[in-house]
């Protein structure tokens, strides 16, 4: 036995190439590693006219097995056996790792260890030739040739042949393993790796496409190779032109030709997918282009991106609607803004706001798209709004109703909704929080789909609920504002109204006269003032008492209020028993008519005054002053003084009459 102890004197390069070429031609058709090894073993045994050829495969765990065998029918088969050779570990493996060859022409007469000789004899071997198969510089297997019928002096050409075959086998094994690694990587990707060939005549073909094509296009790699148009036929119609143009732009580039694009496909089962492709193109001398690339399924990423965009859009819409809602504290305006914004945002056919009070529901605001019917004022009875219904909505949870005819909760309203052509709807409760931490369902924000049954998305229902929550806050603010306004008006009324007569008080009189004086001075328009005093009112109080005096003043105030007709005229209690009437845009003749009207109404009252030296009933004395064009630089005090002087004159002349002051000129 010897390692590498042979001569190449009798072999020529031409002979080796011819024999190895023959082996290579037998190896090439192999479709997988097992077939490759079997073809090699068969070819070597046939060409060497020997009895057995083995591929002794080293396993990752350190064991070894007869993986492939080509053996004559008269000899013992060894395929699949784990051969234990106690002599083998003594250093032989290291020799083989170094690429050395073991040549044994005669087992019986070789200087072998007894254990080794016994092993070979047991498997009928008389001559042995062992060549290592190295793949990627690692000992992958041993290519073993057994001559069993007799000893055999191995010729140099035979040894070189087996060595060359082992070299090619090692190279082929490396390629097979690399291809398998490539396939494993390709199959683990969420897409496919491919090689696509475009011919100058317009023909196309996929020379390689990984197995994941089934996951992408619902078509096997073989199907796509046979019909390359499969991948193009599934491209979404809206994306076909863009995809074609992207490839054409890449073709027109100088080297390197890099291509990347995103597009949609619709698979045979109707599934919409997003794909992303990346490839590198090489142009051959004949003008054909080879594209090596990868196409991956990015649907999940696109859905997430779309969801994030939708979320951002909804937040922006909610922000905008919230701002719009808070621009006004007028409840009517708030409700109108809400239905308009919701209708535009959700593209709904109809939007309602229903107010819930005392167990009844009433539509208080609506927006509807033509040709669908607007909603007339409508109330729902209490039986349509059961308590468990309120309990559900107190949780501030929206409710999607894809079909009103199958909505168990709203059976009593189906007839009403049918008349409005409603097919599906979403309901969001408007819930207000109270100080005691309880929750009040103030109303409902409802959107209708009338043109068709609409598959409302949870995100749409969530957005509607968020709008309803903001509306609840806006309503609460509006109601607080209205109560504040009412309280302020009451305070204003108290601060500017005489509590006894309910006429304007002296403060209100002074403010109003000053404002009207300034306005009419700018407009160069007239203003008149009437001051009137109850004649002998002290005697009336002394005679009838203060309670009767208060009642008398109240009756006189009513008579004065009824005598003035215009909203701009102001009647006021000027003092204890003295009254004033401000008459903007009024000349002397108009003021006299008002004074006469007051006297007539007072006369009809016939309030007795037995102590009056003038008449047995209550009477008034009037002082009238008119400024035809109020002087800009003068205060209205001159008008008051003129009217007061005229009143003094009327009293001096005997009371129960009026006196007119000289006109006030600019």
Image: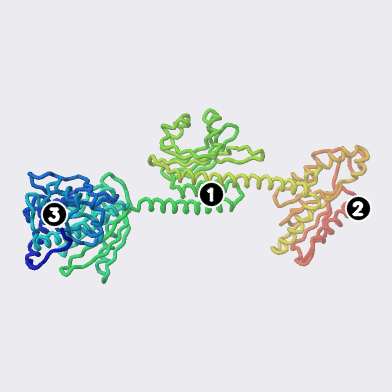
Question: Dot 3: within a 10 Å radius of its alpha carbon, few (fewer than 14), some, or many (20 or more) residues?
Answer: many
Quarter of the image holding residue 517?
bottom right
Q: Earlier in the sequence, mark 1 or mark 2?
A: 1
Question: Dot 1: within a 10 Å radius of its alpha carbon, few (fewer than 14), some, or many (20 or more) residues?
Answer: some
| Residue ID for mark 3 | 128
Relative placement, left or right, of 189 versus 226 is right
Disc number lying in front (3 or 2): 3
Disc 1 + disc 2, Cβ < 8 Å: no
| Residue ID for mark 1 | 337
Quadrant into which the N terminus falls: bottom left
Relative to 438, say whether 305 is above or below.
below
Disc number lying in front (1 or 3): 3
Q: Residue at x 42, y 45 (%)?
A: 370
Q: Residue at x 27, y 64 (%)?
A: 280
| Residue ID for mark 2 | 652
Q: CA distance from mark 3 to mark 2?
A: 160 Å
Looking at the rendered structure, the secondary structure element under dot 1 is: helix
């Amino acid at each position: 036995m010897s390692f590498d102890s042979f001569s190449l004197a009798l072999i020529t390069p031409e002979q080796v190439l011819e024999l190895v070429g023959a082996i290579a031609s037998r190896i090439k058709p192999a479709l997988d590693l097992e077939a490759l090894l079997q073809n090699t073993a068969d070819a070597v045994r046939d060409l060497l006219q020997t009895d057995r050829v083995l591929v002794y495969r080293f396993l990752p765990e350190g064991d070894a097995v007869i993986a492939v065998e080509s053996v004559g029918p008269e000899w013992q088969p060894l395929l699949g056996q784990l051969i234990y050779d106690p002599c083998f570990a003594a250093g032989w493996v290291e020799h083989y790792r170094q690429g050395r060859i073991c040549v044994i022409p005669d087992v019986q007469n070789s200087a072998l260890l007894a254990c080794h000789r016994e092993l070979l004899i047991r498997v009928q071997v008389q001559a042995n030739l062992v060549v290592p198969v190295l793949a990627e510089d690692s000992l992958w297997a041993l290519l073993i040739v057994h001559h069993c019928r007799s000893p055999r002096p191995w010729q140099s050409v035979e040894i070189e042949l087996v060595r060359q075959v082992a070299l090619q086998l090692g190279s082929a094994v490396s390629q097979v393993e690399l291809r398998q690694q490539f396939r494993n990587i390709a199959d683990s990707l969420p897409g496919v790796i491919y090689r696509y060939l475009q011919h100058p005549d317009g023909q196309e073909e996929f020379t390689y496409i990984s197995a994941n094509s089934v996951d992408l296009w619902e078509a096997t790699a073989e199907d796509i190779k046979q019909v390359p148009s499969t991948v193009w036929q599934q491209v979404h119609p809206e994306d076909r032109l863009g995809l074609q143009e992207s490839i054409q732009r890449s073709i027109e580039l100088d080297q390197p030709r890099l291509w990347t694009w995103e597009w949609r496909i619709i698979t045979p089962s109707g599934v919409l997918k997003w794909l992303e492709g990346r490839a590198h193109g090489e142009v051959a001398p004949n003008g054909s282009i080879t594209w090596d690339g990868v196409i991956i399924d990015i649907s999940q990423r696109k859905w997430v991106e779309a969801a994030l965009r939708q979320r951002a859009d909804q937040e922006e819409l909610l922000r905008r609607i919230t701002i719009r809602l808070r621009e006004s504290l007028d409840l009517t305006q708030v409700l109108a803004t809400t239905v308009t914004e919701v209708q535009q945002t959700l593209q709904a056919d109809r939007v309602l706001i229903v107010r819930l009070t005392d167990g009844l529901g009433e539509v208080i605001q609506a927006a509807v798209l033509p040709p669908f019917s607007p909603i007339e004022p409508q109330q729902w009875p209490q039986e349509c709004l059961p308590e468990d219904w309120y309990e559900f909505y107190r949780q501030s949870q929206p409710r999607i109703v894809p079909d009103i005819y199958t909505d168990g909760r709203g059976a009593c309203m189906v007839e009403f909704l049918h008349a409005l052509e409603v097919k599906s709807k979403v309901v969001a409760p408007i819930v207000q929080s109270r100080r005691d931490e309880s929750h009040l369902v103030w109303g409902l924000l409802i959107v209708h789909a009338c043109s068709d049954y609409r598959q409302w998305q949870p995100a749409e229902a969530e957005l509607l609920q968020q709008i309803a929550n903001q509306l609840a806050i806006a309503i609460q603010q509006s109601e607080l504002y209205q109560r504040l306004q009412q309280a302020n008006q009451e305070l204003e009324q108290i601060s500017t109204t005489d509590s006894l007569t309910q006429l304007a008080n002296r403060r209100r009189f002074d403010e109003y006269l000053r404002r009207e004086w300034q306005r009419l001075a700018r407009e160069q328009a007239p203003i008149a003032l009437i001051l009137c005093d109850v004649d002998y009112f002290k005697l009336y109080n002394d005679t009838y008492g203060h309670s009767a005096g208060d009642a008398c003043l109240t009756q006189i105030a009513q008579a004065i209020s009824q005598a003035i007709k215009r909203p701009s005229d102001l009647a006021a209690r000027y003092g204890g028993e003295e009254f004033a009437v401000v008459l903007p845009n009024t000349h002397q003749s108009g003021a006299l008519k008002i004074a006469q009207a007051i006297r007539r109404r007072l006369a009809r009252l016939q309030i007795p005054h037995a102590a009056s030296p003038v008449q047995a009933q209550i009477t008034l004395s009037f002082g009238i002053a008119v400024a035809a064009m109020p002087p800009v630089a003068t205060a209205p005090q001159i008008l008051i003084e003129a009217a007061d002087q005229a009143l003094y004159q009327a009293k001096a002349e005997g009371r129960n009459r009026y006196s007119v002051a000289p006109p006030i000129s600019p």
